[in-house]
Amino acid sequence: MSSSTSDSKLNVVVTGGAGYVGSVCAARLLESGHQVTVVDDLSTGHRDAVPSGATFVEGDVAEVADSLLADGYDGVLHFAGKSLVGESMQVPDKYWHGNVVTTLRLLDAMRRHRTPRLVFSSTAATYGEPATIPITEAAATNPTNTYGATKLAVDHLISSYATAHGLAAVSLRYFNVAGAYGQFGERHTSETHLIPIVLQVAAGQRDQVQIFGGDYPTPDGTAIRDYIHVVDLADAHEAALLRATAGQHRIYNLGNGTGFSVKQVIETCRAVTGHEIPAVVASRRAGDPAVLVSSSERAQAELGWTPRLADLANIVSDAWKFTQEHTAR
Ligand SMILES: NC(=O)c1ccc[n+]([C@@H]2O[C@H](COP(=O)([O-])OP(=O)(O)OC[C@H]3O[C@@H](n4cnc5c(N)ncnc54)[C@H](O)[C@@H]3O)[C@@H](O)[C@H]2O)c1
């Protein structure tokens, strides 16, 4: 059953739409003319991050999915989840329940109410230490932490539901998401992502940034990562939603295909903000590979999507505007 008004304007549920990526995606979907219902328990999200045009349901996806989906929706974009790598090693049950059990409940509700499409937030952490760079979807999946293992388990779950029950499903494996979209940006209480941490130093909220590892086999000795603008990421979700095919589970990596070292990111943040940003080199963290760079060729070829905001200075500049607004409050 579906309640869409036309073939390309859909009525969708966005789980985790009060969080960073989900709020940007919900805002972009609304601008494209889709109807959006956000479900979020506000465990790491913010009520004021839910775009004003969306209907908001406060609750745990595992508990509310069944009653909500009975109303008839064209699809679900499933961002809700737990995503702190360190925490996942200390409190694994929170991750197996929060990511795997919750998604199983969601999939059962979708099956029961015949919700036809799913787009899932997977991660580059499903691959673990890459044997070759750039990382394609054909790379071996050997996650080095519980977070990555739970996301990989969900990918397997989705594959079997797509094959057996005709679900049209897409998993998007994000590399490092960064940047902001106007009032929607990254404000995690436990911030682990490099760009917001560096910008917090620029904003006077932290004294310095720690560089984990200065002796990697990279040109400047610091680790290299692939940063994708959150708006490019959101646009890939709409393309995936519209192109999902019944009975198929497609997996796409989403990154820029270009790597930047930790030192390059800090230098860019200094240039954009005009602040000194003290940095100190600390030891490497266990399980942090030297280089993680995505091949997004499959997404570009099959989703008709291209990252348009790949310039690191633009990504940092958008994140800096957001940081300044939220620091001023
Ligand atoms: N940000 C990144 O760089 C990145 C990279 C790879 C993958 N991801 C994945 O993308 C998704 C979104 O990431 P984010 O950075 O926006 O995280 P976030 O913490 O900002 O957003 C997650 C949202 O889900 C909500 N939530 C969590 N569990 C819930 C539940 N059971 N029921 C209802 N709501 C729940 C939280 O309150 C929050 O608003 C996550 O699944 C994450 O694993 C993010």
Image (cartoon, rainbow, N blue to C red):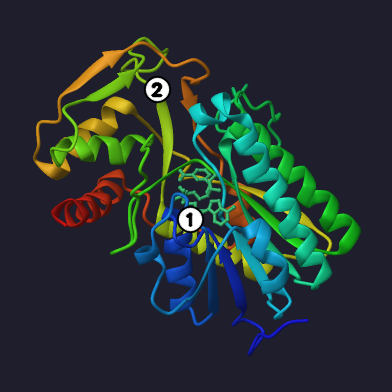
Instruction: Using a 10 Å C-alpha cutoff, classify the residue at mark 2 as few (fewer than 14 neighbours), some (14 to 19) or many (20 or more).
Output: many
Report the residue at 83% width, 69% height from top. Answer: 112
Report the residue at 19% width, 32% height from top. Answer: 206
Image location (x, y in percent) of residue 170: 68, 56
Circle 2 sits in a helix, a strand or a loop, which is it?
loop
Tell me if residue 47 comes above or below residue 220 in the rendering.
Answer: below
Residue corresponding to mark 1: 233
Instruction: Using a 10 Å C-alpha cutoff, classify the residue at mark 1 as few (fewer than 14 neighbours), some (14 to 19) or many (20 or more).
Output: many
Amino acid marked by disc 2? Ala
Tell me if residue 89 comes above or below residue 68 in the rendering.
Answer: above
Image location (x, y in percent) of residue 321: 20, 55
- Give the left or right position of residue 148, taking residue 288 as reference: right
The foreground one among 309 and 279 is 279
- Give the left or right position of residue 5, taking residue 255 as reference: right
- Give the left or right position of residue 277, taking residue 288 as reference: left
Residue corresponding to mark 2: 223
Image location (x, y in percent) of residue 21: 45, 55
Report the residue at 24% width, 35% height from top. Answer: 198
Kindly indicate the quadrant of the structure image that contains residue 108. bottom right
Kindly indicate the quadrant of the structure image that contains residue 90. top right
Which quarter shows the N terminus?
Answer: bottom right
Which quarter shows the C terminus?
Answer: bottom left
Tell me if residue 207 comes above or below residue 308 in the rendering.
Answer: above
Whether residue 21 is visible, yes or no, is: yes
Q: For the residues marked 1 and 2, what is the alpha-carbon distance in whole angstroms? A: 22 Å
Amino acid marked by disc 1? Leu
Tell me if residue 258 comes above or below residue 305 in the rendering.
Answer: above
Whether residue 136 is visible, yes or no, is: no
